[in-house]
Image (cartoon, helix red, strand yellow):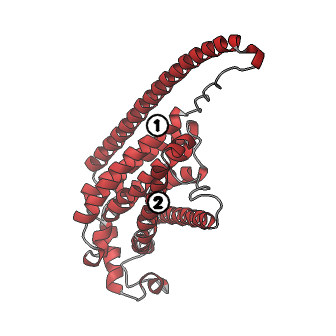
Amino acid sequence: MALSGPSSGPPSLVGAALLGSSDAAFWDEVHALHDNDALLPPDNIRASLTRIAASVATISTLYAFLVLLIRTAVARRRRKNSYEKRNEDNENISNSSRCSRRGSTGDSPAPPLPHISEYKMAYQVTNLVINLVLGLLGLYHFLYTVTPSDRTSPSQRVEGWDDLSIFGELQIGYQLWSIPVGIWLVNEHSAMLAHHVCVMIVASMSAFFTNGFRYFTPFFYGLIESSSVPLAVMNAFRGNPQLAQRYPKVSQMSRNVFIISFFTVRFVLWMPQIIDYLRIAAMLFFTCRTTTCQVGCAMSWISAVGLTFLQLLWATKIVRGLVRLASGGGSVGGDKRGKKEKAV
């Protein structure tokens, strides 16, 4: 079903809203992108599916290994505590027989080992590793591969950069692993499950479509995850108060680093990048020639808006935590249960 012929400039009022001007040449350049095939060549798609499957398998193997490692370490520690407690009980019985008239039972037994969910702890460690890899990879390509936006035409920000499809593939694999683990093993917050679905939608466009906006992927699928590394450390301390009491300076440092990194990459850097992406993606939508094209562009655009809403929601929660902390109540991130123990 054809929707439009060759572009003769932006639709009424839309051009002013998206560009601040009615630049027909700008729109014609975006309109010409619809001459491309919708999907990447079959060989590219098969390679992408292979890499997605490999990433799911690799992350799942890492997670399973960490679960077994943590379970073994906890069981060994519990056996050690049990052995020490039996020795202590025997000593207390011996002491009580000598001091029964005074009612003395010796020293109190050691506190029991707190419950540790190996599934959640392994989830946090896995997220830390994956986010660190994505963050470093994204930082490198953001600085040294993609060209500055003021020297990159709109069409170059939409098509090409096929080598960067690896970011979309890694994110799809990451979310395919995160969703079932989040639902069945770690009881992840519904906001994060929605986040995973939105990331899969926008990442699929980068992995499979010719007009895949891969220019933006080093930032949105890579560098952005760097703020989730201190978040994983912070969540580990939040889940283990005894550890936080033992290393209070490290715990506080993880919070400070997370706050700084979050606002740097997920607000200061995020906003100009997402505005540029949404503007060009909207232009691509308005110049679509088929309903299928419009549906695909709309799904990606709406998912990107949803992800931006989540960033602003989490930023608001952090600010509220800072206000409570400054007023002497609560702590930073205290109500951030919905924040990912990994993020876009």
Question: What is the secondary structure assignment of the residue under circle 2?
Answer: helix
Q: Position of residue 40 (x, y in %)?
A: 30, 55
Label placed on residue 122:
1
User: How packed is label 2: few (under 14 Cα within 10 Å), some, or many (20 or more)?
Assistant: some
Q: Is residue 293 above or below residue 5?
A: above
User: How packed is label 1: few (under 14 Cα within 10 Å), some, or many (20 or more)?
Assistant: many
Closer to viewer: mark 2 or mark 1: 2
Q: Residue at coordinates 51% horizontally, 41% vertically from top-left?
A: 243
Q: Position of residue 182 (x, y in %)?
A: 54, 42
From the image, tell me which residue sits under label 2: 256
Quarter of the image with the C terminus is bottom left
Kind of residue at disc 2: Asn
Q: Is residue 162 visible?
A: yes
Kind of residue at disc 1: Ala
Measure the C-alpha gap from mark 2 to mark 1.
23 Å
Q: Residue at coordinates 59% horizontally, 41% vertically from top-left?
A: 187
**Lateral position of residue 35 relative to residue 272, left or right:** left
Q: Residue at coordinates 43% horizontally, 59% vertically from top-left?
A: 257
Q: Position of residue 217 (x, y in %)?
A: 34, 60
Q: Observer-nearest residue: 244 or 269?
A: 244
**Lateral position of residue 84 relative to residue 130, left or right:** right
Q: Observer-nearest residue: 316 or 324?
A: 324
Label placed on residue 220:
none
Q: In this view, does 61 lie above or below 235?
A: above
Task: Please identify the quarter of the rendering in which residue 20 is found.
Answer: bottom left
